[in-house]
């Protein structure tokens, strides 16, 4: 069985951004989008963090799908930010960016997950490229099937 929800649009502006030290990853992405008049986007980036707060899926037998995000995990830096991707969406007319990252600590241990807004300041830099998505609404909405907030692309 294949089930998808999609909406076909096009790319608009491409914005290259450097987040300066102490700038939170998600807040910086959203500020760059707002400054450049971008409502919906795809983001790719890498760099370094002073610290991070992230979550990943854990078994939750009581959840509708048997899993959900666990507690916020915190890691002090320095942290090498190997790769990150996300979608800049809207929820209730405000930015709601869904972002995942792969990182490693000073010992080289690799870890990652869903980045929590306000917990992940840049150490030296975060280099990113924002690709605007036009003619599609990219929303984050509560999904009845999963009982989680999900990506909802629509025309």
Image: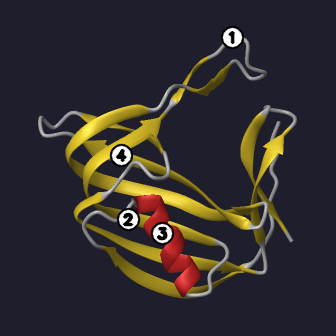
Quadrant for the C terminus, please: bottom right
**Label 2 crowding class (10 Å Cα cut-off): few <14, some 14-19, many 20+?**
many
How far is the residue under mark 3 from the one under mark 1?
A: 34 Å
Among numbered discs 4 and 3, the one appearing first in the sequence: 3
Lower sequence index among marks 4 and 2 = 2
For discs 3 and 1, the disc positioned in front in the rendered view: 3
Residue bearing mark 4: 102
Relative to 51, does residue 8 appear above or below in the rendering?
below
Q: Do the residues labelled 3 and 2 touch (CB within 8 Å)?
A: no
Is label 4 in a helix, a strand or a loop?
A: strand
Number of numbered markers: 4
Q: How far apart are marks 4 and 2 (CA)?
A: 11 Å
Query: Along the line of sight, which residue is nearer the eye, 6 or 64?
Result: 64
- Between label 4 and label 3, give the one nearer the viewer: 3
Q: First in sequence: mark 2 or mark 1?
A: 2
Q: Which mark is residue 61?
A: 1
Task: Tell me which residue sits at (83%, 36%) in the image.
Answer: 1
Q: Which of 154 and 63 is in front in this view?
A: 63
Residue 88: x percent and y percent? 61, 65
Q: How far apart are marks 4 and 3 (CA)?
A: 17 Å
- Relative to 7, say whether 81 is above or below: above
Q: At x 20% / y 39%, what residue is drawn?
A: 105
* Residue wearing tag 2: 45
Query: Label 3 belongs to which residue?
Result: 29
As drawn, is 38 to the left or to the right of 85? right
Residue located farthest toward the top when viewing the structure as drawn: 61
Looking at the image, is mark 3 or mark 2 nearer the viewer?
3
Residue 73 rendering spot, x and y as whole percentages: 40, 31
Report if the CB atoms under discs 3 and 1 are less than 8 Å apart.
no
């Amino acid at each position: 069985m294949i089930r998808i929800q999609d909406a076909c649009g096009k790319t608009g502006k491409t914005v290259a951004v450097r987040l300066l030290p102490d700038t939170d990853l998600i807040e910086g992405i959203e500020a760059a989008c707002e400054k450049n008049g971008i409502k919906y986007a795809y983001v790719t980036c890498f760099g370094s963090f002073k610290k991070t707060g992230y979550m990943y899926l854990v078994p939750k037998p009581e959840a509708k799908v048997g899993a959900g995000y666990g507690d916020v995990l915190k890691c002090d830096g320095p942290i090498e930010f190997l790769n990150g991707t996300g979608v800049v969406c809207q929820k209730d007319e405000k930015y709601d960016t869904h972002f995942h990252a792969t990182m490693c600590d000073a010992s080289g241990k690799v870890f990652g997950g869903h980045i929590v807004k306000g917990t992940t300041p840049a150490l030296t830099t975060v280099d990113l490229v924002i690709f605007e998505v036009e003619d599609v609404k990219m929303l984050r909405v509560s999904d009845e099937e999963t009982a989680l907030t999900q990506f909802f692309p629509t025309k």
